[in-house]
Amino acid sequence: MSEQREHWKSKAGFILAAAGSAIGLGNIWKFPYIAGENGGAAFIFIYLICIALIGLPVLIAEVLLGRSTQRNPVGAFKKLSGKPFWIMIGSMGVIAGFVILSFYTVIAGWSIGYIVEALKGSFSQFSDPGISSSYFEELTGNVNWIVGYHTLFSILTMWVVYAGINKGIEQGSKIMMPVLFFLLVLLVIRGITLPGAEKGLAFLWSPDWSKISGQSVLIALGHAFFTISLGMGAMMTYGSYLSEKDNIPSASLQIVFLDTFIALLAGVAIFTAVFAMGQDPASGPGLIFVTLPVVFAKMPGGVIWAVLFFLLLTLAALTSAISLLEVVVAYFVDERKWKRHKAVMVFGFVVFLVGIPSALSFNVMKDVHFFGKTWFDNADYLASNILLPGGGLFISIFVGWIWGFDKVLIDLKKGSESLFTKYPMIIQAWRIFLRYLSPVMIMIVFLHSVGLLESAMHQLRTSWVMISLVCGLLYLFIQSRKK
Ligand code: PHE
């Protein structure tokens, strides 16, 4: 308790930092390729519904939990409930921060590596995706290259978090977010002025409903969590540096709006260029690192556009990575009374070490599989499909059912009284979404992914892990309600 808890200097500082957390690889790397694989416009429509009906209500709940308790996820649940079950849910968030950051820094590292490759003119030889794809495999197959950039990106992340909330995260986001936006606008203008860009726009805006299946709805929901940084306490931790005069619903709306807007702009920038250069929009995770370099090779002034694009991706990833590390650091500072600097150095390094097997999953550990997947894929799967939706489920249940809605309302109204006097139904809608819609939807996601896994033998083991996990959590939850 010796150090005073820092607070955001301004509401804009909070919004930019939180939007920085939300806007990341999820928006610029993942969103365009999953939209591309799932048929474009119709998928985007479903994704927008998930964001509005589930993402926004859960975001408000998370930020509120942080602000009311002024703590990291573990401390927040400790303060409000004290029951081991809920403390464990908070710990799951801190673990998720670890897991996501460990593989996030690997991909973000590629992005820095690609800035260097673009500057070296490596992309100019990419006449077709085949060449680009073997070049990508050659780079990621090189241990020094991949671990080197993973190290560099980890150091950058630690550097910002080391400087603290105001001088590091807030100041950094205030500089990086406008630059990111500016770069993206340039890339959008470049994209839409290319001959043939209309085909890309048509792909994004004219829905083909036949492409939508149950599976695409689940992907959309899972991505809604990942892209708003929900379910693991990043937004809770950022909310814990907020003061009572700030309006949480309006700040949350702005964060969700910025995140969605940037994802859509990234989609426009990427698909106009991809279609104009006659490339495949559904090329999966390689869309950014394999297809786009070919697009840049064919484009006039491609080197510059490539540098700007990968700079944009790096900045977006950095403002997200710092929020992931901050969750872990805040836990050690609040709960274990560590000094921030020590926590950053120690856990920055530990996360870096845990990330190494993820980096090696593309080369020496390519064939080392656990539960049928590489280390990297397991880390991604564990975080995106289990920890985040699981966290989201229990955060909704906690705020909707357990905390006590009268107390929730007293806290939520701080800073937003006039909004609720004007539109009282907002509260009712929020409550219904948190109590019913969000838990039910997330449960469906869980059950469905379990069902899917049953199809293959080697994946069956994973589903047992998931079934036991879900049953175990439910059991603990029921126990915790008994007293
Ligand atoms: N929202 C980030 C992205 O879109 C990822 C992230 C998830 C960051 C969870 C923090 C917490 O890339």
Image (cartoon, helix red, strand yellow):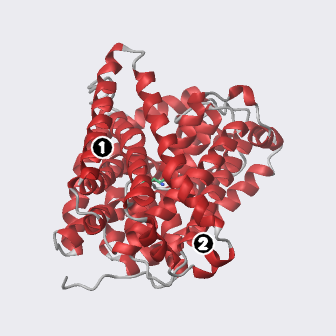
Q: Label 1 crowding class (10 Å Cα cut-off): few <14, some 14-19, many 20+?
A: few
Image mark for residue 250: 2
* Quadrant housing the C terminus: bottom left
Q: Quadrant of residue 219?
A: top right
Please state which of residues 377 and 352 is positioned toward the viewer in this rendering: 377
Q: Is residue 383 left or right of residue 483?
A: right
Mark 1 near ligand 1 (CB under 8 Å)?
no
Query: What separation in Å lies between label 2 and label 1 (alpha carbons)?
Result: 46 Å
| On screen, residue 185 above or below 411 | above
Of the residues shown, which amino acid type is indicated by label 2?
Answer: Ser
| On screen, residue 257 above or below 368 | below
Closest to the camera, between mark 2 and mark 1, is: 2
Q: Is residue 240 visible?
A: no
Which residue is found at the position 63% from the left and 62% from the top? 257
Q: Is residue 173 left or right of residue 351?
A: right
Q: Is residue 75 visible?
A: yes
Dot 2: what SS? Answer: helix
Mark 1 sits on what residue? Answer: 144
Of the residues shown, which amino acid type is indicated by label 1?
Answer: Asn
Please state which of residues 91 and 428 is positioned toward the viewer in this rendering: 428
Dot 1: what SS? Answer: helix
Q: Position of residue 334 (x, y in %)?
A: 23, 72
Q: Position of residue 433 (x, y in %)?
A: 55, 53
Q: Position of residue 105 (x, y in %)?
A: 37, 51
* Quadrant housing the N terminus: bottom left
Please state which of residues 45 and 173 is positioned toward the viewer in this rendering: 45
State which image quarter holds ligand 1.
bottom left
Q: Quadrant of residue 196?
A: top right
Which residue is found at the position 64% from the left and 35% from the top? 36
Q: Position of residue 383 (x, y in %)?
A: 37, 43
